[in-house]
Amino acid sequence: MRKDYEELLTHIKPKEPPTGLFDRIILAIKREQELRQTKRLLFSFLFLLVASFIATPLSWAILINQIESSGISYFISTALSDFGTFIALWQDFSLAILESLPITGMIVFAISLGMSVFTFRLFLYRKRLLLGYLMQSFA
């Protein structure tokens, strides 16, 4: 009985895949890898964008607090209100203003503002790629 089955099965050829199936499989795998990469890119952009937009107002508040506590507003208002004295002692006033600048607050604010602008610009630059991903994922 086994020989009958073996003879019967030897005549059956294994079914060959249609032509181009391998290429379609490879293309589907590449498309899935691109979608994963685009998804990772989208989430990293959104995280960086949200983090930078949260950090900017906080760093602005820190900068304003440091400006108020540094006394720089006193030097600037004095220089503007008594301009003659400012002209006579402009070197001393300038040094006093430079010494009382809140450098750390300005650096933190500049970094957070630069990061938010850079992220937003990069997000808009890659918008076509990200919108393409969103359209494919919802379709």
Image: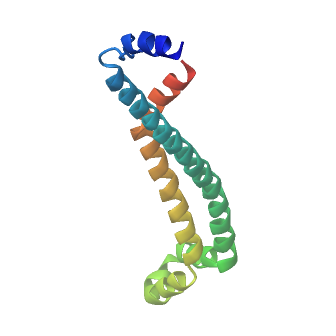
Q: Residue at x 60, y 57 (%)?
A: 56
Q: Quadrant of the N terminus?
A: top right
The coloring applied to the image is rainbow
Q: Picture coordinates of residue 25 (x, y %)? A: 39, 26
Quadrant in which the C terminus appears: top right
Residue located at (49% from left, 12% from top) = 5
Along the viewing direction, whichever of 118 and 130 lies nearer the viewer: 130
Q: Which residue shows up at 49% across the image and 44% down it?
A: 41
Q: Residue 129 is drawn in which quadrant?
A: top left
| Residue at image location 65% in from the left, 66% down from the top | 64
Left or right, residue 64 beside residue 45: right
Q: Residue furthest left?
A: 19
| Front position in the image: 136 or 30 | 30
Percent of width and height locating residue 29: 42, 32
Say how many tags the image has. 0
**Relative to residue 13, is residue 110 depicted above or below?**
below
Q: Is residue 102 visible?
A: no
Image position of 93 with respect to 30: above or below: below
Decide: is 27 above or below 54.
Answer: above
Q: Position of residue 42 (x, y in %)?
A: 52, 41
One can see residue 46 in this view: yes
Name the one closer to the observer, 11 or 3: 3
